[in-house]
Image (spheres, rainbow, N blue to C red):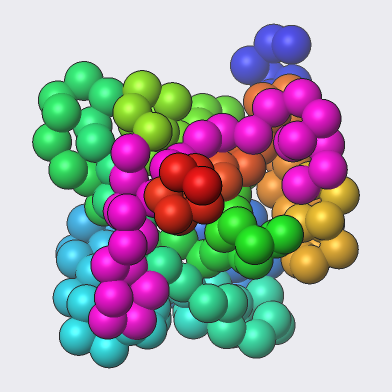
Amino acid sequence: MSESDDHRPATTAEKETFSSGGRRHLILLRGKWGLAIDRGVFLATGYSPMTKQYCFAQGHPYQKTLMLSTIGARTGKIRRANLPFFEVDGDLVVRGSNGGGPTDPHWAHNVRAHSPAWIRIGFKTHPVHAHVATGEERERLYEKMCRLSSTTKSYQDMCAPRELPLVVLRPWSRITR
């Protein structure tokens, strides 16, 4: 595929346009300062205004959001991202859409390098084992995720040929049994 044939969003503006369903003018929190505000509000309230604005722009109800803390693949430093999540078969699953862009988000690379992670939902933090689903597990999760959210297929279509990472966040208590 040549660069001119690549339909995936490459710039932040293109990602915002795709992720907002073409209603980018409704996205007020942007860039590093927007992420910092979102992180602060989330820590204080357990609610993500960033998620809310994208859901609103797309005409969807608010999607529950968690804060994922991963270990940096190169730096070893703790990295955080607020992400909408889905409950599937007792696990939590997040999508590595990166706004439909051509590359996986940084936190997906971190999960591949280091499976220990932490999630914060509301005001509680829990250790989890994180992994990117592959093979039959990914196929099963993808089917269920498409039923839970119409945007799952849209993100997969937009980021193709890259495979949309589906990251499973499993409590350590379920691993050690």
| Highlighted magenta segment, given as a residue range | 116-141
Residue occupying image coordinates x 51% and y 58%? 16
Foreground residue, 63 or 26?
Answer: 63
- Up the image or down, 142 lies above or below 46; here it is above
Residue 143's x, y, as percent? 86, 49
Q: Is residue 127 visible?
A: yes
Q: Quadrant of residue 107?
A: top left
Asked whether, in this view, residue 147 is left or right of residue 132, the answer is: right
Indicate yes or no whether the magenta region holds residue 137.
yes
Q: Quadrant of residue 134?
A: top right
Residue 77's x, y, as percent? 13, 36
Q: Residue furthest top?
A: 2
Residue occupying image coordinates x 41% and y 49%? 172
Residue occupying image coordinates x 82% and y 56%? 144
Residue occupying image coordinates x 60% and y 57%? 91
Asked whether, in this view, residue 124 is left or right of residue 174, the answer is: left
The quarter of the image holding the N terminus is top right
Q: Is residue 106 visible?
A: no
- Up the image or down, 35 lies above or below 170; here it is below
Residue 145's x, y, as percent? 77, 56
Foreground residue, 28 or 80?
Answer: 80
Indicate yes or no whether the magenta region holds residue 148.
no
Asked whether, in this view, residue 116 is left or right of residue 168, the answer is: left
